[in-house]
Image (cartoon, rainbow, N blue to C red):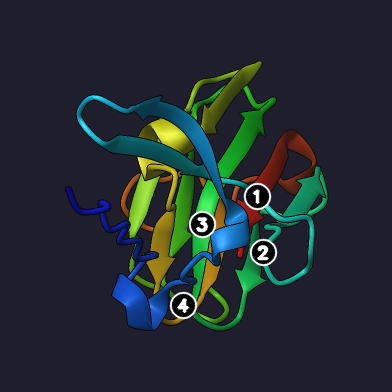
């Protein structure tokens, strides 16, 4: 009987992702009959591994989370305006441009939170940079009012 081989690749394949070390892989379940060992990646609390957090509480309607390639893991966006708004992300290093993806934020006390359920545990890879905006218009960036929006993002 041979020992199973574990293969792990990060976002963008092995060239674009971080390949975990043996210390990061924690046994979660074993099946000695079938010879299977399930593992899960353990997060390491070091700057090289821990995601960064961006927070804008009523301060801006656009910003750059990362001005180089990176991974978006999760975000939450809130809207206090009487009209719906759109949370938009862009694959750029600053400003806005072509909307990469957008989500509707409901009116008045609307809030959306998107994480691993949508981005998967590996997140979404952005080859240029991670820029965000809260817009009044679907499909293109038209600045909303900063004091009416809150944004928090987890990225690396």
Instruction: Name the residue at 37% across, 57% down.
Output: 140
Answer with the quarter of the image where residue 148 lies: top right
Residue 14 on image: x %, y %: 34, 76
Left/right of residue 81 with respect to residue 142 in the rendered view: right
Q: Earlier in the sequence, mark 1 or mark 4?
A: 1
Q: Nearer the viewer, residue 38 or 85?
A: 38
Name the residue beneath numbered marker 3: 72
Q: Does the CB distance between marks 1 and 3 fall below 8 Å? A: no
Q: Which mark is residue 66?
A: none
Q: Residues within 10 Å of mark 3 (few under 14, many from 20)?
A: many
Name the residue beneath numbered marker 2: 49
Residue 104 in view of the camera: no
Q: Earlier in the sequence, mark 2 or mark 4?
A: 2
Mark 1–mark 4 distance (CA, rounded to whole Å): 27 Å
Q: Nearer the viewer, residue 138 or 154?
A: 154
Answer with the quarter of the image where residue 132 lies: bottom right
Q: Residues within 10 Å of mark 1 (few under 14, many from 20)?
A: few
Residue 83 on image: x %, y %: 53, 25
Q: Does the CB distance between marks 2 and 4 fall below 8 Å? A: no
Name the residue beneath numbered marker 4: 92
Residue 134 in view of the camera: yes
- Disc 2 versus disc 4: nearer the observer: 2
Q: Does the CB distance between marks 2 and 1 fall below 8 Å? A: yes
Left/right of residue 147 with respect to residue 136 in the rendered view: right
């Amino acid at each position: 009987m041979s020992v199973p081989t574990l293969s792990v690749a990060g976002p963008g394949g092995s060239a674009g992702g971080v390949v975990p070390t043996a210390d990061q892989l924690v046994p979660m379940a074993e099946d000695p009959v079938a010879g299977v060992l399930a593992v899960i990646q353990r997060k390491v609390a070091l700057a090289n591994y821990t995601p960064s957090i961006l927070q804008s509480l009523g301060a801006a309607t656009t910003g750059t989370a990362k001005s180089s390639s990176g991974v978006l893991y999760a975000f939450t966006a809130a809207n206090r305006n009487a009209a719906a708004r759109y949370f938009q992300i862009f694959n750029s290093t600053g400003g806005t441009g072509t909307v990469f993806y957008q989500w509707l934020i409901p009116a008045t006390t609307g809030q959306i939170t998107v994480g691993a359920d949508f981005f998967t545990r590996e997140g979404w890879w952005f080859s240029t940079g991670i820029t965000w905006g809260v817009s009044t218009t679907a499909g293109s960036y038209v600045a909303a009012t900063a004091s009416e929006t809150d944004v928090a993002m987890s990225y690396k």
